[in-house]
Amino acid sequence: MLGLFFVEKTMRESWRWFGPNDPVTINDIRQTGATDIVSALHFIPAGEVWSIDAIREHQALIENAEAGLTPLKWSVVESIPVHEDIKLARPGHQMYVDNWIASMENLAKCGINTLCYNFMPVIDWTRTDLDYRLPSGAYALRFDQEKFAAFDLFILQRDKADTEYTREEILVAKQIYDAMSEAERGELTENIIAGLPGKMADSYSLDDFRTMLSNYSDVSHDSLRGNLFAFLSQALPRAEALGVKLAIHPDDPPRDMLGLPRIICTSADLELLFKTLPSPSNGITLCVGTYGSRPDNDLPVMAKQFAARIHFSHLRGVSRDSVEQRSFYEANHLDSDIDMIAVIKELLSEEKRRRQADSDSGEIYIRPDHGHQMMDDIGKAVNPGYSAIGRLKGLAEIRGVIRALSGDQSELVS
Ligand code: DNO
């Protein structure tokens, strides 16, 4: 009888921890049932080497549990920032490439082998609203294209921005801008250029921001892509030798913005990446919510197409506005525009395939990405998107799906 209830353990449940200042503590995370931690040395400025001592110290904070408590493991790094000079291939950038590789080597020496990173110029992920009220009374993150245009055109007043919007879009943006109070304009600016934890080390004033953007005025998609490939052609051979898996995170939202080229947004972008650099260490973070905020990305299809390249996955749902499809809010993990169950099915099939092939590419780390601010989360200081209860709800739902689908794995892998 007992055998009936035996379910093979699949997918590594991980949880992001921002370090000792994260209001969600390691002991809180332990209670969620997640087994693995996703973290980074956010206090080290972009471009500097992560020393073995600094890594070990952070690792001890995560892994040294009180006797009797379930241990947690720091398994995934998110992220070692890629210095802007590498993205721009500026003279002298080789030092930053060497430092990035040295950090990767030090992490590998400490047993941390899965590494998420991104190649977004200037800004990391971006939202316009950090407390968008849902009908349930909980709060979500939202990207509002019209508000974003109001920021770009009338607050930032970016050079040539008006050539990138239609007349109609400019009119709507102006109405939105006019209706905003000074405080609301300040908050929008803060949210876009200074606020989110993905770019903890970098926040800018409006002037610095304009300067940073102008560095890219002559950088085309092809040249940015060339710079990514040049960086990876140095990092990947070392990663392969060390058994490290690199997992590039998509550009969020996945399209050009603020006149910046963005190059990891679609299946075609990934096809080109792997055609150019087929190394088995060259992989992706399947950020379901990011890719899913474009209507032309079909997530279950992408999960299948790139299955062998997925080392890490952020599970999160988005609902796009019906008319302006570039605007979205972060919906419930299972109820959004994305068929999350179909995505999870693909990930489980891939894990099964790896087990059958006895492949060393191993299990896929997943984490509940972002969560609503709800119940006791409300009113607490949280890193936007990274509240405890909202994420726990997401994890619990995802865990249920995984468990249900894992019961009969014979149907997986078609
Ligand atoms: C947002 C995150 C991003 C991500 C980086 C990865 O919640 O998914 O900040 O950590 O872009 O490099």
Image (spheres, rainbow, N blue to C red):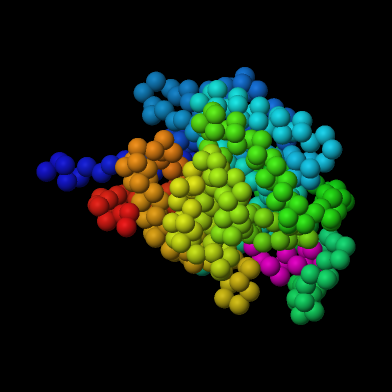
Query: Among all residues in the image, which is located at the extreme bottom?
Result: 168
Q: Give the left or right position of residue 412, taking residue 24 as reference.
A: left
- The residue drawn where x is 16% and y is 42% is 3
Q: Main secondary structure of the magenta part?
A: helix
Between 169 and 187, which is closer to the camera in this rendering?
169
Residue 113 position, x and y percent, is 52, 32
Between 368 and 275, which is closer to the camera in this rendering?
275
Q: Is residue 150 magenta?
A: yes
Q: Is residue 386 visible?
A: no
Hey, which quadrant is residue 279 in on the image? top right
Is residue 243 placed above or below 337 in the rendered structure?
Answer: above
Between 138 and 213, which is closer to the camera in this rendering?
213
Q: Is residue 155 visible?
A: yes
Q: Is residue 217 magenta?
A: no
- The residue drawn where x is 83% and y is 70% is 162
Residue 368 position, x and y percent, is 48, 49
Residue 270 position, x and y percent, is 58, 54
| Magenta span | 143-154
Query: Among all residues in the image, which is located at the extreme left?
Result: 1
Is residue 12 placed above or below 254 in the rendered structure?
Answer: above
Residue 89 position, x and y percent, is 79, 42
Which quarter of the rendering shows the C terminus?
A: bottom left
- The residue drawn where x is 33% and y is 46% is 352
